[in-house]
């Protein structure tokens, strides 16, 4: 029998699909053609029916849909472990606030390329940048050249800085207000500019509508942003209810807590995604269950800022009631990439509502894809979806799953299992743990050079 030709065959994999209805194939395989998944299933069936010029033997290692990071401020990537944190006070000219506002197109291009390498090496194939990159074209170009998906929007979408300045002064400086003036029309215009990226259906980098959140958008700007998102069929995103101080301030200035206020303004919908949501009351919880916005949970930040506890962590409760929850690390300055999955399990257990071991795997794949508005295109290994595939490298016995058919190992230890091969949109972008599209060593060297030059400039 003549075999059907495809572009890529992946064989001998421990395949976790991200589709709960058909979660696992061992030994599994999949075929890719024209950027899409043609078939996924048992190797014996697929190897006998398909042939490809590129055949990858996974060697029994884990194969899964690319992870999606739904809250990562790219400008913090080069400063992991630096002697300052976003929560720390301003003690020198070089700090988190001054570094992120002083970027140039060259700095952003260098940092973005380095971030792409870091993400791909940990199995992430989509980076959601939550509205803090000024040079968005440089960001988008770098991500595209590296071959990774990304989402980008207007930087610092706000029109009232009083809450931000009063509650989080360590993240605010005069230069930030100059580069991102609190002006509603500026925000809507810049969001509209980013949405032009979506005219290309196959673009790796897409735009969405972003408000910074935490009470920094007036009712009028929130309404305008919600309308733009609805008219453009994209998500509306913002930080919300991170600290009790923000919640109390928003109630005092705007009349309601964040979720209640957004509902009042017509902005709380399934196409809305809210990050943090650490401080909720009964009215917030009821609305989230009924309206089903997507939630981006950063358990590391909730623990690091000592918000949870004392405040109740609602995410396991909401997830078990059908709310789509994805995961984010927020800032890489003090939190390593890939830590959110493991911490979500530990935090859920500590409050007596332990998630299933595999839940963080789904939160970082199909749930995350739904939250960023791409659930019909990516997030699982299913026929017809775009081929975003990660093949891990099995180097020791802890890298193999045993009697696991849902993805528990991918939730518990994925950040510690090395990545061998990454396919994004049907193209191999990482081989043997190294970027296949560009010079990875050169990218790292340029990012370090730009980082050190920027610090030297600020020190003046």
Image (tube, helix red, strand yellow):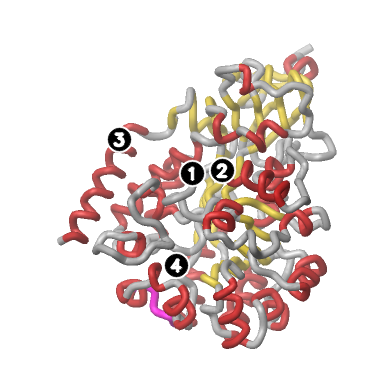
Where is mark 2, residue-wise?
A: 339
Where is mark 1, residue-wise?
A: 336
Q: How crowded is the residue under tag 3: few (<14 C-alpha within 10 Å), some, or many (20+)?
A: few
> How far is the residue under mark 1 from the one under mark 3?
23 Å
Of the residues under marks 4 and 1, which one precedes in the sequence? 4
> How far is the residue under mark 3 from the one under mark 2?
27 Å
Q: Residue drawn 48% across and 23% down?
A: 432
> How far is the residue under mark 1 from the one under mark 2?
6 Å
Q: Residue 86's image quarter?
A: bottom left
Measured from the top left, where is residue 27 in percent x and y?
A: 74, 18
Foreground mark, 4 or 2, reads 2
Where is mark 4, residue-wise?
A: 155
Q: Is residue 346 above or below residue 75?
A: above
Of the residues under marks 3 and 4, which one precedes in the sequence? 4
The single residue placed furthest to the left in the displayed view is 460
Foreground mark, 1 or 3, reads 1
Where is mark 3, residue-wise?
A: 442
Q: Is residue 394 above or below residue 125?
A: above
> How far is the residue under mark 4 from the one under mark 2?
26 Å
Q: In this rendered view, identify the residue nearer to me: 193 or 400.
A: 400
Q: How crowded is the residue under tag 2: few (<14 C-alpha within 10 Å), some, or many (20+)?
A: many
Residue 188 falls within the magenta-colored stretch: no
> How far is the residue under mark 3 from the one under mark 4?
28 Å
Mark 1: which secondary structure? loop
Secondary structure that dominates the magenta span: loop
């Amino acid at each position: 029998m003549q075999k059907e030709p495809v572009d890529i065959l992946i064989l001998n994999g421990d395949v976790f699909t991200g589709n709960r209805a058909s979660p696992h194939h061992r030994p599994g395989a999949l075929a890719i053609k024209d950027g899409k998944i043609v078939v996924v299933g048992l190797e014996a069936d697929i190897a006998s029916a398909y042939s490809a010029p590129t055949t990858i033997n996974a060697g029994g290692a884990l194969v899964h849909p690319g992870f999606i990071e739904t809250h990562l401020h790219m400008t913090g990537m080069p400063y992991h472990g630096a002697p300052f944190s976003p929560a720390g006070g301003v003690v020198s000219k070089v700090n988190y606030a001054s570094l992120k506002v002083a970027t140039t197109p060259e700095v952003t291009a260098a940092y973005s390329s380095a971030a792409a390498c870091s993400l791909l090496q940990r199995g992430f194939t989509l980076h959601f940048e939550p509205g803090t990159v000024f040079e968005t074209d440089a960001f988008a170009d770098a991500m595209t050249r590296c071959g990774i998906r990304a989402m980008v929007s207007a930087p610092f979408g706000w029109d009232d800085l009083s809450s931000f300045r009063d509650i989080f002064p360590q993240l605010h400086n005069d230069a930030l207000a100059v580069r991102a003036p609190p002006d509603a029309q500026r925000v809507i215009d810049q969001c509209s500019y980013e949405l032009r990226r979506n005219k290309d259906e196959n673009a790796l980098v897409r735009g969405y509508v972003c408000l910074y959140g935490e009470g920094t958008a007036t009712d009028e700007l929130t309404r305008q942003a919600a309308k733009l998102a609805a008219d453009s069929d994209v998500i509306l995103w913002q930080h919300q209810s991170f600290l009790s101080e923000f919640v109390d301030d928003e109630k005092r200035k705007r009349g309601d807590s964040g979720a209640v206020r957004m509902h009042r303004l017509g902005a709380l919908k399934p196409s809305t995604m809210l990050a943090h949501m650490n401080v909720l009351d009964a009215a917030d919880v009821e609305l989230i269950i009924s309206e089903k916005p997507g939630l981006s949970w950063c358990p590391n930040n909730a623990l690091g800022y000592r918000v949870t506890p004392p405040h109740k962590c609602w995410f396991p409760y909401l997830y078990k009631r059908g709310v789509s929850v994805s995961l984010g690390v927020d800032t890489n300055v003090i939190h390593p990439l890939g830590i959110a999955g493991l911490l979500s399990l530990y935090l859920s257990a500590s409050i007596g509502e332990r998630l299933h071991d595999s839940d963080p795997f789904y939160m970082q794949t199909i749930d995350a894809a739904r939250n960023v508005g791409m659930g019909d295109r990516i997030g699982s290994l299913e026929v017809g979806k775009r081929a975003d595939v990660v093949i891990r490298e099995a180097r020791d016995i802890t890298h193999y799953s045993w009697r696991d058919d849902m993805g528990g190992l991918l939730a518990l230890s994925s950040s510690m299992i090395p990545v061998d091969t990454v396919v994004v949109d049907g193209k191999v972008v990482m081989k043997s743990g190294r970027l296949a599209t560009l010079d990875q060593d050169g990218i790292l060297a340029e990012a370090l050079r730009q980082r050190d030059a920027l610090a030297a400039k600020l020190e003046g």
